[in-house]
């Protein structure tokens, strides 16, 4: 009995401490917070991007005693908070690039997680690639306190590389024959040929982009023409201009359009119209299955290769406009009408370069296995 009385004070203290702890837990305020590992979501924009769906939800640390109603609200004033916190110079995402699909979120009684608010992001491909865009969102509710550090959320959008791999075709060339859709390239009346190229050096009489020798060809240099100057060679004569000179060790987009009906020939560099002429010729890229097939990186003989890299080569049976050419240097929708062949040159295969147009006009490397190089295009400013 004496031992029991001996421990009574200790037991009383433990009881009181336990009671105090229980009281603190019961009186601890339940708070809501955005249910995410971080308070921002970064989306890398590639190409047209399409429509992107995003969601947002909240949670509580303990089950809700009653239903909690909250809503997500666009709060543009938070842009300055984001820029200060992340040492950024972001701009607000334009209004026509997003839609609040559903703003309400509900945590049911007895639950700790809410239903989702949802957003739809669109038209992102047309944004300035040099700018980081932010859509700030905050949560509002009168049913529960919100954790101050977890009530604001930032949807961040920035441009990413559109091209990650290219082909180095020095001392190599590619061929297509027969075309899978020969009727599309036989007796063409209109054409656009384009490619993104990186010449490391010229220094030879002719460097070839694409086409058929003596028929219809886009090449660089010739006798009496600077070795860095684009020339269009046809069965009815050639066309060039001093404004068509290219640089080494730099990515440049080259494009040719020709309309047999109007006889208008135009040559673009980096999306800019640099030279044009009225010229009568036949568009002949079908090939003969022998010594006059459509080639990339060769014309007539091996010494006329392209000493450098290539990407985004395309052939169309329509005349692309200046805006269409300038706005799609790094990528284009493979489902575009008029696209005969689309060689992205990103396959990393041994010999075959896939035609992304769906027409089956794959290229085959004829001289050596393909060499692939990693890049990041367009280059960051």
Image (tube, rainbow, N blue to C red):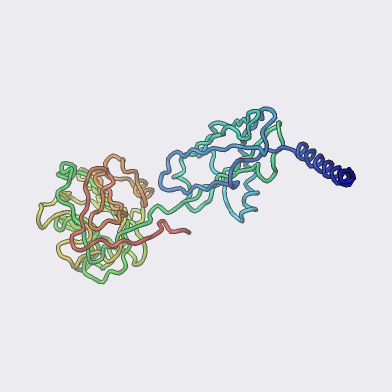
Q: Residue, x 20% and y 45% (percent of image)?
A: 260
* Left or right, 148 with reference to 17: left
Visible in this render: residue 281? no
Q: Quadrant of the N terminus?
A: top right
Q: Residue, x 28% and y 39% (percent of image)?
A: 337
* Left or right, 263 with reference to 159: left
Q: Position of residue 167 (x, y in %)?
A: 30, 59
Q: Position of residue 202 (x, y in %)?
A: 27, 69
Visible in this render: residue 90? yes
* Left or right, 302 with reference to 241: left
User: How many marks overall?
Assistant: 0
Q: Position of residue 30 (x, y in %)?
A: 71, 37
Position of 91 relative to 366 (above/below) = above
* Left or right, 30 with reference to 356: right
Position of 59 relative to 303 (above/below) = above
Q: Position of residue 329 (x, y in %)?
A: 36, 52
Position of 245 relative to 265 (above/below) = below
Q: Residue, x 37% and y 50% (percent of image)?
A: 326
Furthest residue toward bottom: 203
Q: Residue, x 56% and y 34% (percent of image)?
A: 116
Quadrant in the rendering for residue 368: bottom left
Between residue 196 and residue 363, name the one nearer to us.
Answer: 363
Between residue 154 and residue 4, name the one nearer to us.
Answer: 4
């Amino acid at each position: 009995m004496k031992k029991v009385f001996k421990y009574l004070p200790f037991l009383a203290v433990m009881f009181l401490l336990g009671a105090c702890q229980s009281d603190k837990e019961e009186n601890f305020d339940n708070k809501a917070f955005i249910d995410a590992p971080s308070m921002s979501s970064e989306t890398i924009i590639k190409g047209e991007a399409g429509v992107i769906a995003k969601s947002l939800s909240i949670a509580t640390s303990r089950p809700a005693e009653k239903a909690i109603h909250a809503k997500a609200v666009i709060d543009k004033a938070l842009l300055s908070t984001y820029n200060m916190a992340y040492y950024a110079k972001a701009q607000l995402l334009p209004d026509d690039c997003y839609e609040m699909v559903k703003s309400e979120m509900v945590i049911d009684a007895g639950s700790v997680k809410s239903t989702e608010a949802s957003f739809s992001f669109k038209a992102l491909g047309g944004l300035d690639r040099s700018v980081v865009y932010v859509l700030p969102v905050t949560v509002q509710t009168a049913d529960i306190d919100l954790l101050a550090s977890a009530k604001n959320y930032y949807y961040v959008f920035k441009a990413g590389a559109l091209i990650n791999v290219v082909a180095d075709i020095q001392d190599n060339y590619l061929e297509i024959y027969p075309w899978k859709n020969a009727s599309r390239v036989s007796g063409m009346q209109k054409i656009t040929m384009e490619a993104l190229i990186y010449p490391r050096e010229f220094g030879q009489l002719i460097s070839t982009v694409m086409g058929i020798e003596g028929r219809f060809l886009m090449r660089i240099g010739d006798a009496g023409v600077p070795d860095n100057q684009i020339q269009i060679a046809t069965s009815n004569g050639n066309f060039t201009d001093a404004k068509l000179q290219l640089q080494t060790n730099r990515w440049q987009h080259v494009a040719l359009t020709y309309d047999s009906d109007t006889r208008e020939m135009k040559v673009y560099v980096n999306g800019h119209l640099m030279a044009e002429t009225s010229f009568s010729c036949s568009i002949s890229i079908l090939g003969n299955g022998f010594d006059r097939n459509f080639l990339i990186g060769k014309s007539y003989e091996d010494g006329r290769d392209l000493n450098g890299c290539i990407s985004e080569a395309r052939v169309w049976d329509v005349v692309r406009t200046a805006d269409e050419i300038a706005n799609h240097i790094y990528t284009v929708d493979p489902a575009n009408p008029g696209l005969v062949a689309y060689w992205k040159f990103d396959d990393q295969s041994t010999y075959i370069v896939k035609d992304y147009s769906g027409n089956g006009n794959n290229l085959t490397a004829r001289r050596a296995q393909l060499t692939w190089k990693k890049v990041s295009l367009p280059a960051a400013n």
